[in-house]
Image (tube, grey):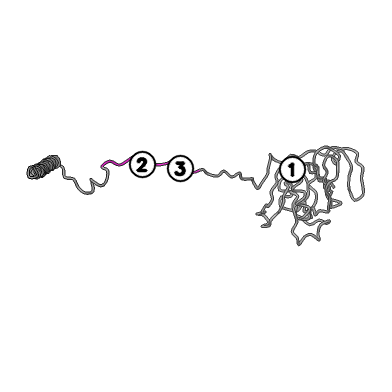
Amino acid sequence: MKLMKIVIVLLILFLGIVSGYIAAMCIQDAEAKTVRALSKTTASKPVSATSLSRPTSKAPVRVREIRSVKKQIRIIPRTITTTSPISIKAPAEPVASELGGKLKDNFTMSPGKNIDISLEAEHFWAYEDGILVLDQPISAALGPTVPVGELGDQAHNHLGIWYVYKKVPLHHSKAYDCDMRLCLFYCDGHALHACQWSDIDRLGMKASHGCIRQHPKMAKKVYDWADLATRVRVRE
């Protein structure tokens, strides 16, 4: 009995070894067939290492369009101007003279901003709605008083009432090669403007070519205060 059991066990082991060998041979044969099939497929088109490691088609690249935005800068003009200067005939009206050539009349007492200039007193007064807001000595022209358009480049004064038609913070006179600061133009080339610091001692006496010179500090106040609607009267 024992011998029969031993024989059966050995037979089972032998059959297991044979079946394992047959299975291994089948797997090897199947792998060989697969390799031959692949070699036939890729024979007409070689496959490189690069093509195997990288995709053959590239993904579309999206480019984002960036639009430049220009910063808008509002530029404030250096010169403020309106139409040509307007001359107004001074009305014949009774006036009440005050100390130092100051007048109280319809011009100085009228609404709005008004600048009154006396050539005789060499002084100016600035009014707003009839209230005196600024006043100081000035320097008028050395020449005589003439109608507008006469004497050309000679020193002279004009009498009349005008509107400020242009404001220029810094004007350079080509005729006399000099700077005129804080200009309020009211008649042709005539303007109220700041005098040179070296000419401050001449305020209160005739010294200019035709403009009305002011102390630089006062000229700044008048320039900031006045506008294009400001009236300017030049009188004896």
Q: Quadrant of the N terminus?
A: top left
Return the residue nearer the eye: 48 or 29.
Answer: 29
- x%, y% of residue 11? 8, 43
Does residue 32 appear anywhere in the picture? no
- Residue marked by disc 1: 227
- x%, y% of residue 50? 23, 48
- Outermost front residue: 1
Instruction: Give the Cα distance between marks 3 and 2.
Output: 16 Å
- x%, y% of residue 235? 83, 46
Q: How many numbered circles does the render carry?
A: 3
What residue is rendered at 86% in x and 52% in y?
121
What is the three-letter code of the residue carrying label 1? Asp
SS at mark 2? loop
Query: Which span is picked out in magenta?
Result: 56-68
Mark 3 or mark 1, earlier in chain: 3
Q: Which mark is residue 219?
A: none
- Residue marked by disc 3: 66
Q: Are marks 3 and 2 in contact (CB under 8 Å)?
A: no
What residue is rendered at 49% in x and 44% in y?
68
Q: Answer few, some or many: residues within 10 Å of disc 1's Cα (few below 14, many 20 plus, some between 14 and 19).
A: some
Instruction: Give the Cα distance between marks 1 and 2.
Output: 61 Å
